[in-house]
Image: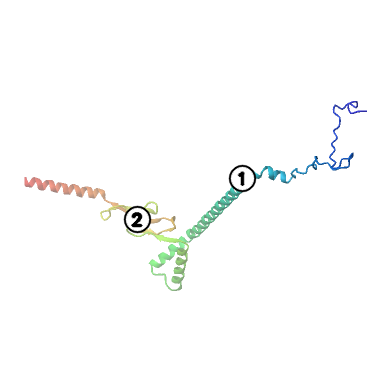
Amino acid sequence: MTARENGSEQEPVIRDNRKIDPETGTARTGAAAPDAEAPTAEEAPAAAGGDNGADLLAERTADLQRLHAEYANYRKRVDRDRSVVREQAVAGVLTELLPVLDDIGRARDHGELTGGFAKVSELLEATLGKLGLVRYGAKGDPFDPNVHEALLHSYSDDVSEPTCVEILQPGYRMGEQVLRPARVAVAEPDETAAAEAAGADSGSADSGESDQN
């Protein structure tokens, strides 16, 4: 029974790939070994994508550079956050010690800072200075509302601008951060007295001119 009689539309195809002709017994010269020149499965992608090797290398290099930049930014951010946390912790400790420094200052003003207590206080102040604590506020400083707190106010002919004429309590800062503003007494120029003086001088000048006339 043929393949067509068996219901198949096509007959099976038989390929004779034998290198020796079975009828003559001689070697076949026209037929090549099957798949002799066919590339292997591993060689095929390399042969097909050989031109894309440089592009792939460039892409991987760009990915590595981007990863390196992201890691460098992460390290900088971590170091910056660690520095901020440290500064906040130090500022908190220094703020708690300010009342102690106030007591030491009052004892020094009254002549009570003597003996071993004087040595301890000097060591404490030096240590806090190494941590960045700076005391500020002096008589005659221009008044700055950003670093001074005015508790008393007056007018004076001896100043030409708002001036700290008395330091009631010193201020402290650490770097640019103000831990406690200096509490001061402020004096401003007496504009009323100055205006009256200017008016009196003007009146005197007019009176002199009238006498001459």
Outermost residue, bottom side: 115
Q: Quadrant of the N terminus?
A: top right
Residue furthest right in the image? 1
Identified by mark 2, the residue type is: Ala
The residue lying toward the viewer, choosing from 79 and 156, is 79
- Assign a secondary structure to mark 2: strand
Asked if residue 143 is positioned above or below residue 35 in the image, the reply reads below
Numbered disc in front, either 2 or 1: 1
Q: Residues within 10 Å of mark 2 (few under 14, many from 20)?
A: many
Per the image, the residue denoted by label 1 is 55
Report the side of 180 relative to 189 (left or right): right
What mark, if any, has residue 185 been given in the picture? 2
Rendered position, 3 above or below 171: above
Quarter the C terminus occupies: top left
Assign a secondary structure to mark 1: helix
Residue 95 at x, y percent in the picture: 48, 58
